[in-house]
Every structure is written in structure tokens, then in C-alpha cells.
Image: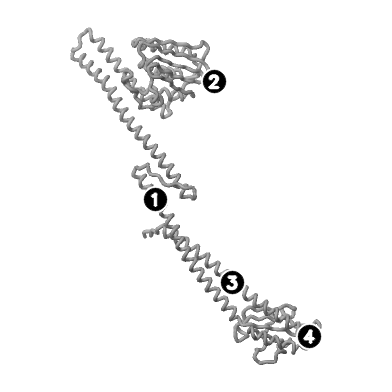
Amino acid sequence: MKNRRINYFYQLMGSHLSILLISFLILSLLFVRFVEDFAYQDKAEELENYGEQILTELEGPRPGVNLEPYVSILQAQNINFIVFDQQSRILYPISEAFPPVELTGEEWDTIERGETLVVNRDVQRFEDTVTFVALPYVESNQLVGGVLLAAPVSGTSEMIFELNRTLLTAMLAALAIALLLSYLLSKLHVSRLQRMRKATAMVSEGNYDVKLPESGYDEFGDLAKDFNDMTAKLHKSNEEIERLENRRRQFMADVSHEMRTPLTTIAGVIEGLRSDMIREEQREKGIRLVSEETKRLMRLVNENLDYEKIRSNQVSLLKESVETKELLEIIQEQMEFLAAEKGNSIIIDAPEDQKVYVDMDRIIQVLTNIVKNSIQFTENGEIRITSYSEPGYAIIEVEDTGSGIDVEEIDLIWRRFFKSDVSRGSGQFGLGLSIVKQLVELHGGDVRVESELEKGTKFIIRLPDEK
């Protein structure tokens, strides 16, 4: 069986009204009970006071004469009284209007103990429902009988009825007002939920610019704030995904272009060699060109593989204590020929006793990438590699006198898919600097760059001392 759907508006209305009705019912019952008890108690106290006055008159020299005024006074208030003995015989007044006194054994026990008997509602022993009290009548420390005063409850009942009617009217008026307020509050809450629902639907459709009004008054306001924070993060993530996707497309286009060139060259040379279109004296040059282009392809593939390994934490460092000067001399020796092709010189400056605790192959990879980058954008200049110490770290600086980097691009050069302005140099594409940054951070160090257009660039690497 399909579950019936109940609108949240009606749930709110139902919960509000249920609470109000239950509260009104409980309060009304308690109030009516309290008023009834109070009214009957007040009537009993009134009868008890008259009874004590009658007992005082009975102690006088002429009780019969002294009680006459009370008969007319009490009858005017619709109150009857009698004086009776222990055999329940009426001693005063002598009248057949009042029925014989018929008290139960427990009621007699109360009187015999010298206590006042109070019955708020009696419906059996009198013609009408009455409230009566019976006070013990004692002479010379002996119980003679008692004084009984009775008053119909009709006046009290009428007062309680009027009170109940007034209470019911007030309750209905309050219920109407509560119904209106409940309707307005439910509408308010439901409208806020509907607004959130519409905003959620917009987010599910890919619109992350939606924003809900915030307020700190209740949980709805907190929820709106959390929702806005979520959409802001989703918007930022979506922008980052779009940026990455654009970079990926650009990366694939650039890689395809970079690979197409050496592959075309290799295919052309091999076809020329196979068909004897290349003269004998040019064959060695063609084979060397194929070798260089093959190495270029291997570099592109290896850089991608290295980056993926580093990104997925698959690289294990084999650290050892390495002399900084020896490390820089290796870089100088490897890069000297490449620098000379562009008219550059490589100068190193390192203290004799300085050491770093690194994976030597990976640090050579780092420095090789940075020096190659400096050579690429420097012509007929100087590339200086220096090192010095700071507390706990060895600092290696690679500074060139090349074309420099635009200020707006300094923070972008570490990105995987970033390609600098090709007008600054050869425009070769690679992942070198992105790999550099991650490898340095894997060693527990950091790398930063300082540059100024047309004045050169300085890479500053901090690596931990020997441990």
C-alpha cells in the first residue's frame, strides 16, 4: 500500500493545534476543579461560621429566644439550620420542614471526636443537592448533639456554570487567535523550506550562484548559512574542475603537438634512410637527429610518469648524506654543453663542508629541471648556482640573467598544465617545474621563485641538513 503524503504545512498546523487543545483542556479541567473546590470550601466556611455563632447563642441563658433572629437571617440567605441530639432528634426549631438527620457511622465518629463535619455535595438525604456542615454541641464537657446547617448548591452551581461558559468563550477566542498565529507561522516556515527546496533544485541543475538569505535567529538561518557555504565551495570546486579540464585539453593539445614534431622527424628520417633518399654524408646527421628526437619523446613520457607517481605517493626516497659542492659540480658538468650552445656560462659557489640529507638522483632531477629552465630563457648570459646554510637547512639558489617571468605568472609556473608565453623562448612544453615543487616538498623542504622581466630569475630551494 502506498504511503499517503501529508503536507508539512498541515503537519505543523496539526502539531500546533494538538498542543494548544491539550494544553487548554488540561488547564480548563484544573481551573474548573479549583474553582469548584474553592466555591464549595467558601460556602462550607460560611456555614461553619454561622454554626459557631449559633453554638455561642446556645450557651446563653435563653437559647431559644436568642436563636430566633438567626432563623430569619439564614432563611433570607436560603440556609436552614437545626439543633439535634445524639438520637438525631431535632431540638430546634420545632418544624417538620426539615427532614430527620440521618448521619452515617463515620460522620457520627467525626462529630464525637469534636470535629466539624463538612459535606460539599449531598444528593440523597435532602430534597435538593446541598452543602452542609455539622458542628458538635457540647455542654459540661459532654456531647449533647450538634448543629447542622445546609444550603442548596444551586447558587454555587450557577456560578460555576457561568464561569465555565466564560472560560469556554475565552478558550474559543484564544483558539481562534492561536489558529491564526499557527497558520501564519506554518506559512512562514513552509515558505522558507520551499525557498530552500527551489535553491537545492537549482544547485542540482548546476547553478551554484544561488544564495539564500541568512539569519541567526533560528536553525533555518543556520541551515541557510551552511547551504550558502556549500554552494560557495561547490562553485569554487566547479570552477577548479573547469580550469583543470581546460588545462587538460590544452595539455593534450600541447603534448600531441610536441610529440607530433619529433615523430614526424623520426618517420621522415627513417623513410629517407630506407629509400636511400638521404646521401651517405648526411646519414650520420639523420641518425643523430632521430636519436635526439627519441630522447625528447622519452623525456615527455618520463615526466608524465614521474608526475603521476609523485601525485599518487608511489615515490620512495633513498636519502643519504650528500656534499652540496659535489652535487652542484655534477649539475655544472651535465649542463655546461647545453648552456654553451646558447652562449651561457654556469658558475657554482658552495662551501666545502656543507651537506644535505637527500635522495641524490631526485635532487639532481630537481636541479637539472631548474637549470634547463634557466638555460631556455637566457642567451649570452650567466647562470649562477650557489649554496649556503641557515639553521637546520641548506639553501641552494639558481639565478640567471635571462628574460625573467611576468609577476602574474610567478604563482602559476608550478601548475601541472601551465605553459609560459612561448614568445620568451623556444616554447617547449613539459612538467618540469611541477615535478620540482613536489619532489622538494617530499624532502621536507620548499622552493620559491623571485623574478623581474628582462632582469632574470632566481629559484631558491631549502633542503634539510644532514640528520
Tell which of 457 and 429 is nearer to you. Answer: 457
Secondary structure beneath dot 2 equals: loop
Secondary structure beneath dot 1 equals: helix
Circle nearer the viewer, 1 or 3: 1
In the rendered view, does 127 fall on the left or right side of 111? left
The image shows residue 445 at horizontal and vertical percentages of 48, 23
Name the residue beneath numbered marker 4: 60
Chain-order first, disc 4 or disc 3: 3
Name the residue beneath numbered marker 1: 195
Q: Residue type at mark 1?
A: Arg
Tell which of 182 and 84 is nearer to you. Answer: 182
In the rendered view, does 12 fall on the left or right side of 48? left
Tell which of 55 and 238 is nearer to you. Answer: 55
Q: Is residue 151 above or below residue 337?
A: below
Q: Is residue 309 above or below residue 15?
A: above
Q: Is residue 271 visible?
A: yes
